[in-house]
Image (cartoon, grey):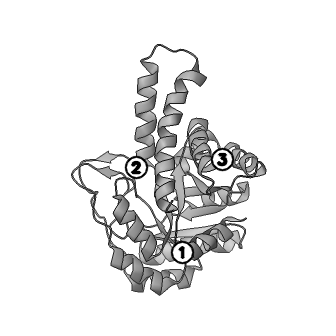
């Protein structure tokens, strides 16, 4: 099953596919094992920095091996800020790519995103981002400056003029976890945008949002949900605990970090798949 078919199946069932960012083999192991144990599809996300660390071709190869073993695992080139790097990801064999020009002018965002859609030629799914929700998957003490919300009118024009397959709108979500209180998701706005664009929507920055909000967003039209910050925190805490244990074999002390991440992955996948 292709990623496009997987998303269509999620649409039919009214659920969402979990998207988890990783930057090394431990993160990959946690996400893939969690999805396998639940028997659900999953998307591995690698941003520009993450894929520079693990290696673009290396992570594509890992995903291909997992698929060869019968698992529904896909790879997304997350938050790509240049045409050159987006093209490189497409040529490397990813399943989808996000060309993120949300901080550019509306016209420039359309132009650059359209360029990637044309270059892809249907080889991969292309996702565009409209509206600014911050850039850092970190723990924040306040909502980043300049955060906006996407209007249905702009979303409709953006989709029509670019020809994208997926849209990531700004709907009250932010990247990272805000310690002073996560902004509320605008569920009615999600529904209005979905009605206007008629293509699947992607929710970025879902770390920290309540289960109830996530389910409401899925019911309103979200078909892919991104989790990064919560996974990073789980990794760090598991690793800190393991290193202090005195164990020196990496495959043993890294297991605690993997298990911590897997716990987050399974919890989120159960929520997104309504199981």
Instruction: Inspect this view and state whether residue 47 appears.
Output: no
Mark 2 neighbour class, 10 Å CA radius: few under 14, some 14 to 19, many 20 or more: some
Say which quarter of the image contains residue 106.
Answer: bottom left
Q: CA distance from mark 2 to mark 3?
A: 20 Å
Q: Earlier in the sequence, mark 1 or mark 3?
A: 3
Residue 82's spot in the image, x, y percent?
A: 55, 60
Residue assigned mark 2: 137
192 or 86, nearer to the observer: 192
Q: Earlier in the sequence, mark 2 or mark 3?
A: 3
Residue assigned mark 3: 56
187 or 228, nearer to the observer: 187
Q: CA distance from mark 1 to mark 3?
A: 26 Å
Residue 55's spot in the image, x, y percent?
A: 64, 42
Residue assigned mark 1: 200
Indicate which disc residue 224 carries.
none
Count of numbered badges drawn on the protein:
3
């Amino acid at each position: 099953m292709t990623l496009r078919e997987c998303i269509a199946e999620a649409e039919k069932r009214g659920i969402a596919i979990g998207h988890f960012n990783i930057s090394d083999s431990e993160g990959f192991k946690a996400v893939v094992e969690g999805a396998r144990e639940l028997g659900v599809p999953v998307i591995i996300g690698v941003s520009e920095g993450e894929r520079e660390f693990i290696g673009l071709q290396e992570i594509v190869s890992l995903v291909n091996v997992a698929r060869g073993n019968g698992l529904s695992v896909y790879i997304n080139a997350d938050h790509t800020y240049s045409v050159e790097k987006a093209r490189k990801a497409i040529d490397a064999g990813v399943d989808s790519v996000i060309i993120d020009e949300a901080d550019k002018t509306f016209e420039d965002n359309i132009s650059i995103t359209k360029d990637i859609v044309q270059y892809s030629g249907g080889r991969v799914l292309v996702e565009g981002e409209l509206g600014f929700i911050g850039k850092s998957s970190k723990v924040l003490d306040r909502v980043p400056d300049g955060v906006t919300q996407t209007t249905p009118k702009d979303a409709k024009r953006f989709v029509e003029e670019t020809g994208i397959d997926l849209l990531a709108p700004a709907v009250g979500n932010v990247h990272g976890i805000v310690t002073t209180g996560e902004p509320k998701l605008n569920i009615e706005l999600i529904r209005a945008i979905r009605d206007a664009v008629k293509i699947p929507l992607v929710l970025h920055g879902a770390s920290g949002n309540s289960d109830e909000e996530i389910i409401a967003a899925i019911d309103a039209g979200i078909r892919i949900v991104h989790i990064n910050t919560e996974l990073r925190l789980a990794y760090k805490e598991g690793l800190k605990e393991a290193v202090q244990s005195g164990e020196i074999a990496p495959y043993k002390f890294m297991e605690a970090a993997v298990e911590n991440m897997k716990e987050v992955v399974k919890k989120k996948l159960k929520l997104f798949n309504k199981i």
